[in-house]
Image (spheres, rainbow, N blue to C red):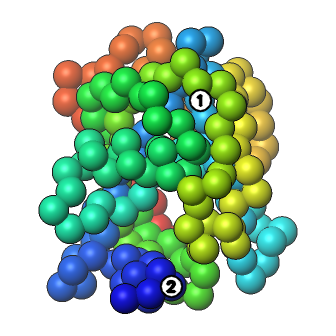
Amino acid sequence: MSEPEAERAAAVGSAGQPRRAARVILLDPADRILLLHGFEPADPATTWWFTPGGGVEPGESLRAAALREVAEETGITSVRLGPAVWQRSCAFDFDGRRWEQDEWYYLGRTHAAEPHTQGHTELERRSVRGLRWWTCEELLATRETVYPTRLAELLRRLLDEGPPPSPLLLETERD
């Protein structure tokens, strides 16, 4: 299967079930979070920020997918992956198709400072402008779209209280 075919098939999991995705709340030593700046390929003016992560491959664990996706999307391989802290279901239109996925968010820490996009897929090359470290205060103040919704509040709580004993179930988000 070619890369574009694999990406089309990944929009929804097997047997029409939601795609399983692992995402990472990647923090540096100053508690800044790394986000990717995405856009709709057909409408580059429609932009948003989002956490690194993506689909779980067959036979892959959520944790392994989280680490692989961070390495592919950011170039950062020195990640200390902590627990799953959030879980959400979402559905959205992107690149001409409907995506439905169940996402698990893991807390990750790194000392790496300079991410890069050299490992991006063809779709990511067509839909990601770059990466940026954000402070919680910057996220609280921004008017830009950030996913998951309420990321700034969720991050503030995570930094103040630490990881929850089990993943918090976030609101289902559907476009």
Reading the image, the residue beneath label 1 is 33
Label 2 secondary element: helix
Give the answer, above or below, for where 2 lies relative to 31.
Answer: below
At a point 69% along the width and 60% down the height, the residue shown is: 128
Q: Residue 88 in the image: x percent, y percent?
A: 34, 51
- Which mark is drawn over residue 4? 2
Give the answer, above or below, for where 155 lies relative to 75.
Answer: above
Give the answer, above or below, for where 147 lies relative to 137.
Answer: below
Q: Residue 70 in the image: x percent, y percent?
A: 47, 44
Query: Could you tell me the amino acid type at mark 2?
Result: Pro
Q: Residue 15 in the image: x percent, y percent?
A: 18, 85
Classed neighbour count for the residue bearing mark 1: other residues with Cα under 10 Å, few (<14), some (14–19), many (≥20):
many
Q: Residue 37 in the image: x percent, y percent?
A: 70, 52
Q: Are marks 1 and 2 in contact (CB under 8 Å)?
A: no
Q: Which of the two labelled residues, at mark 1 and mark 2, occupies the earlier sequence position?
A: 2
Classed neighbour count for the residue bearing mark 2: other residues with Cα under 10 Å, few (<14), some (14–19), many (≥20):
few
**Could you tell me how far apart the alpha carbons at marks 1 and 2 are, in whole angstroms?**
29 Å
Taking the view exactly as shown, the residue that stands out farthest to the right is 45
Query: Could you tell me the amino acid type at mark 1?
Result: Ile
